[in-house]
Amino acid sequence: MHEIQPSFIVLSPQSTPWCRYTGAVGVALQNFLWTLPLLAEEMNIPILGICGGHQALAIAFGGKVGPIRGGQHDCMPYIRDRQGGVIGLKLTAPDPIFQGVEGELRISSSHYDEVKVMPPGFVLLASDKNSPIQIMRHPKRPVYGIQGHPERYDTNRPYGGILIRNFLTIAQTHNEAIRRLSSEAPPVLISSRPKSWLRGH
């Protein structure tokens, strides 16, 4: 990632219950999830998680995920209790990602798992009575999780596209600010004198 220096990362949906990732695949997944806080908090990379990506963010930052009609420790196949179709969300906190959204936010949805417990400090931005944690944000970084599918939008249902456009604007503004701070940082003076000189003075 240090070599690539991405402007942002999008975590895409997935189609396997989280509890089914075992063995080598489970280890690889866990290793990947461990990197997400580093990418967001140390490397300052904006991240957008969509559907399963939203759930991945929750797991990576200390939240809990489970099936919609089960508990956070239950394991169920993806053949039952799905939230689907176009749903209306209640906005619970203001945020730049909602710029241009007027009235009810309607978004396509299709998922069997959901975020049961948000990561510590995360902010709930939008909710629904059947699956309460629909949109969340990291408290200090431009890291967003959206349970629905904002990539599915059209002229009659434009809000998904608005959310994506706003995230890209947020990411661009954030990256410009980080570059500006980096260019303004004073140079670090590294002494070339031997350690014995340092001890003597």
Image (tube, grey):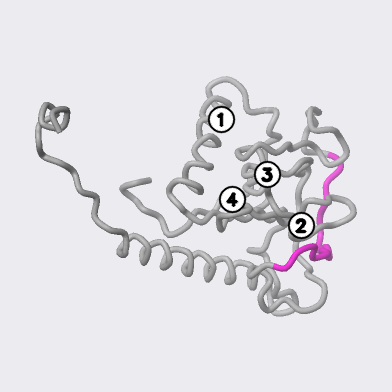
Q: Residue at x 57, y 66 (%)?
A: 167
> How far apart are the alpha carbons under marks 3 and 1?
13 Å
Q: Residue at x 67, y 65 (%)?
A: 152
Q: Does 95 sit left or right of 75 as displayed?
A: left
Disc nearer the start of the sequence (4/1): 4
The residue that mark 3 highlights is 55
* Amino acid at circle 4: Ser
The residue that mark 4 highlights is 12
Name the image quarter holding residue 136: bottom right
Q: Nearer the viewer, mark 3 or mark 2?
A: 3
Q: Crowdedness of circle 2 by 10 Å Cα count: few (<14), some, many (20+)? A: many
* Amino acid at circle 2: Ser
Is there a contact, CB below 8 Å, between mark 3 and mark 4? Answer: no
Q: Is residue 113 visible?
A: no
Q: Residue at x 36, y 53 (%)?
A: 5
Q: Which mark is residue 30?
A: 1
For residue 154, above or below residue 88: below
> How far apart are the alpha carbons under marks 4 and 1?
16 Å
Disc 4 secondary structure class: loop
* Amino acid at circle 3: Gln
> How far apart are the alpha carbons under marks 3 and 2?
14 Å
Residues drawn in magenta: 80-94
The residue that mark 2 highlights is 109
Magenta stretch contains residue 121: no
Which of the pair 89/63 is nearer the observer?
Answer: 63
Disc nearer the start of the sequence (2/1): 1
